[in-house]
Image (cartoon, coloured by chain):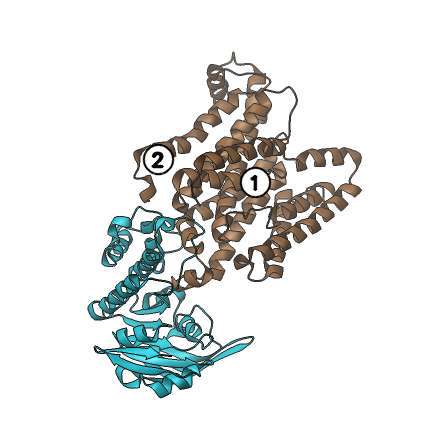
Chain colours: A cyan, B brown
Amino acid sequence: MNVRVADLEFAYPKFSLRVKDLTFENAKITAIVGPNGAGKTTLLKCIGAVLPIRRGSLFIDGRDLSSLKSRERARLVCYVPQEHDTTFNYTVSDFVLLGRAAFISPFALPSREDASAAAEALEFVGLAEYADRSISELSSGERRLVLIARALAQQSDILLMDEPTTFLDPKHETEIFQLVRKLADEKTKTILVTLHSLEMAVQHSDQMVFMKRGEVVAQGRSAEIFEDSLLERVYDMKMKIIDWEGRKIVLR
Amino acid sequence: MSGLKNSRSRGLAIFLLVLPLFLFLLSLTVGAYRISPGGLFKAVLSAVAPASHPDVPEAYRDILLRIRLPRVLLAMAVGAALSVSGASLQALFKNPLVNEYILGISSGAAFGAALSLVFLGRTLPPQIAGFVFAVAAVGAVLLISGKAESHFISLLLTGIIVTAFFSALLSLVEFFASPYVLQALFFWLMGSLSLASWKDLYISLPLIAVGLLVLYLLRWRLNVLSMSDEEARSLGVNVRREKILVIGAATLITAAATAIVGIIGWLGFIVPHLVRMMFGADNRRVVPLSAALGASLMMVADDIIRGVSSFEIPIGIFTSLVGIPIFLILLKKTKKVWL
């Protein structure tokens, strides 16, 4: 599904986000990058209707998102937070089952179909044997996978992933990106992902969006748009990209 | 419900769910005037069909129907109500320390009920007056503390201030009450089941039943609402509407209970913790098992008060004195995360 953002505006007391026109293509991974405070997460939260937008419109395959009820919207778009605060220590399977909320009336319980959708999602991320473990027993990397599994159980076509690899070691970081690629290729999910690692962003995304001070500075195909001059303009520091065995390395 | 795959847990859960029924029957036999199980059976039969057992003394029926039955029913209902209210509010506010007292619900309800008893001569039932002021109190706490569910300190401080305000209003009511009413009011505020009457139960029981039913039906939804508001919204929940529903139901049952029995400390806080320690955090289990355990503990506490001592200790004092050490012992023994 295509996502289109038109004349979007959102304001915090000391920050405002303004996006004129931005399109995210179906079944592609788009990396949203930029310095801290650029508005990456805010943009993601606005698209996911986690934050209420003041002005502008969001269209998914031409449908205006504001005309949809919470449950209808959640079946189309899912925001995957960076971390989950484990106040209550649910089991992994109970946690993934929460992804089915949009399919269940507030006064009802999950059905067998909901349970099997959650189990299938857990299987897809490779954590089926962790189903009965408590969330607090998992490592940080495993918890990220569980968050992705919950998003998969939600069965929405658009996944908005907020820095899914922050604080992860290189192995887990790579595993998460392999999973994200699998989601785009095998399940035709449209994926928007905010990232700090420029190397990871260019390596694993199809498209990139560069943001700075609440505005989009540049957008395009990752391989074409990723240049020294753009990085210097966005990050206000000298940067140099070198090619190493087909991969881009950023020197700073 | 993966946590109940363990057969021991399943057995314990079934035991807890059946326990209130057993304790209900047992509680009817306990008191200064002891009635044997056989006597209880005959008294019930004679109450239903007086001609069938003419040998049953009138006093049996009176004690059973006018004194014990309303009292035991009230103990069950209040225990279940406060425990489910506590469990629901803890899940909703994503904080295991939240309870109806912190949110000002108890003090608002106590003031409303006292106002009705002292000045309005019950023209407005204390349960309704208690509910109105409990809603005012929790509404004030939530409005003043803003997005307090994510800033617990702010919620806590506002709760303390609002509770202090309604406590001051309650003191004002006490100040103007006649000495006779003041004594009854004082005893009631410490938490007492001795004032149980059918008249009060006719109003409180349906209110508690409605509130409990709403929270029971919402029990899985409480799992979703225990996520951050952003997560819950992204999962497709109308967070504002469902929060109002949960807070409304929890306030209703707390007010309906507080209006008759006064403030029962710690039960609504401790019972959900005990259940989570034993069965995990899933509210599909926590809500019904908290109701069963809360009802059971209230009945046991009341049985001890009625059966052991010749004078009546207010049950609110008793639940605090007994509940807190039990909680601390379990906390030390369990030594693991159960939230």
Residue occupying the far top of the picture:
B55
Of the pair A251 and B100, the residue shown nearer to us: A251
Residue at screen point 26% across, 53% down: A127
- Split into 4 quadrants, where in the image is the C terminus of chain A? bottom left
Where does residue B233 sit, x and y in percent of width and height? 42, 63
The amino acid on which the numbered mark 2 sits, given as a three-letter code, is Ser
Q: Is residue B338 left or right of residue B93?
A: left
Residue at screen point 56% across, 35% down: B324
- Residue B204 is marked as 1
Residue at screen point 47% across, 72% down: A52
Dot 2 and dot 1 within a common chain:
yes
- Split into 4 quadrants, where in the image is the N terminus of chain A? bottom left
Sequence-wise, the earlier of marks 2 and 1 is 2
Where does residue B325 sit, x and y in percent of width and height? 55, 32
- Residue A33 is marked as none
Mark 2: few/some/many CA within 10 Å (<14, 14-19, 20+): some
- Residue B9 is marked as 2
Q: Is residue B302 above or below residue B221?
A: above
Where does residue B149 sit, x and y in percent of width and height? 53, 57
Q: Is residue B183 left or right of residue A200?
A: right
The subunit carrying tag 1 is: B
The amino acid on which the numbered mark 1 sits, given as a three-letter code, is Ser
Kind of element beneath mark 2? helix
Q: In which image quadrant can residue B232 be found?
A: bottom left
Mark 1: few/some/many CA within 10 Å (<14, 14-19, 20+): many
Whole-angstrom CA distance, mark 2 to mark 1, is: 33 Å
